[in-house]
Amino acid sequence: MKRKDFFQLLQPLTDKLYRLAHNMLPDDLQAEQLVIDSLNAYLIKEKKQILAATELDALTKKDIQLQRRYYLKGLFRYMSEIGVRRSMQLMDQMKYNRPQDFQSFYGLEPKVRLVITLRYDFQFTVEEIEDITGMPRYEVIEKLHNGRFLLLNEFNNGVQP
């Protein structure tokens, strides 16, 4: 596959990439840089596989959708690895720059935000989240449970009787 075809294939996925990046790092500039870094890392490490892929003209519509999903999961894998490390480094800075609307969500640990976003925003299964994040199944389930509990608890504390 040519580089141009690869970027054409990824074009519809950019919204999803930026959405995950922004959930990992609420700062617009940091989120944009995360997408760029993840895409570059993916292109460098998976170059042979991308070049060996079938040309877009030879694929059916269903095959193109499957190919997109495969690349999306691969990009999310790189983005989760880089994003978690970067958000841990920027933890103190993010305390002051957190969006006012979603303080309870951005107050969660980065891995918990990642797992909740992948599950509820992108509708990935626990097995797919395992594959994307590299976490064992029990850890994914634990982070989902704890994240939901913390968010619901925060929401219930904010409701006045």
Image: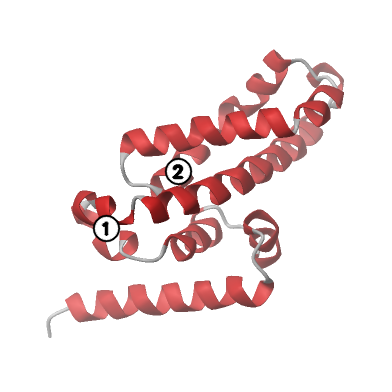
Question: Number of labelled discs?
Answer: 2
116 in relation to 155, above or below: above
Dot 1 falls on a residue whose secondary structure is: helix
Whole-number angstrom distance, CA of label 2 to CA of label 1? 15 Å
Query: Could you classify mark 1 by the number of other residues whose Cα lies within 10 Å: few (under 14), some (14-19), or many (20 or more)?
Result: few
Q: Which residue corresponds to the image point at 41% horizontal and 56% vertical from the top-left?
A: 88
Q: Hey, which residue is sitting farthest bottom in the picture?
A: 161
Give the residue displayed 33% in from the left and 46% down from the top.
26
The kind of residue on which mark 2 rests is: Ala
Q: Is residue 1 left or right of residue 19?
A: right
Quadrant of the snapshot with the C terminus? bottom left
Residue 116 horizontal/vertical position (percent): 48, 63
Which of discs 2 and 1 lies nearer the camera? The answer is 2
Which residue carries the number 2 mark? 21
- Which sits in the foreground, 13 or 141? 141
Q: Amino acid at mark 1?
A: Phe
Residue at x 26% of width, y 74% of height: 155
The residue that label 1 is drawn on is 102
- The earlier-in-sequence mark between 2 and 1 is 2
Q: Residue at x 84, y 25 (%)?
A: 59
Name the spot of residue 65 as percent of width and height, x first.
72, 36
Query: In this view, which residue lies farthest toward the front?
Result: 89
Give above or below for 110 relative to 3.
Answer: below
- Give the image location of residue 9, x and y in percent: 67, 25
**At which x and y percent is residue 77?**
63, 48
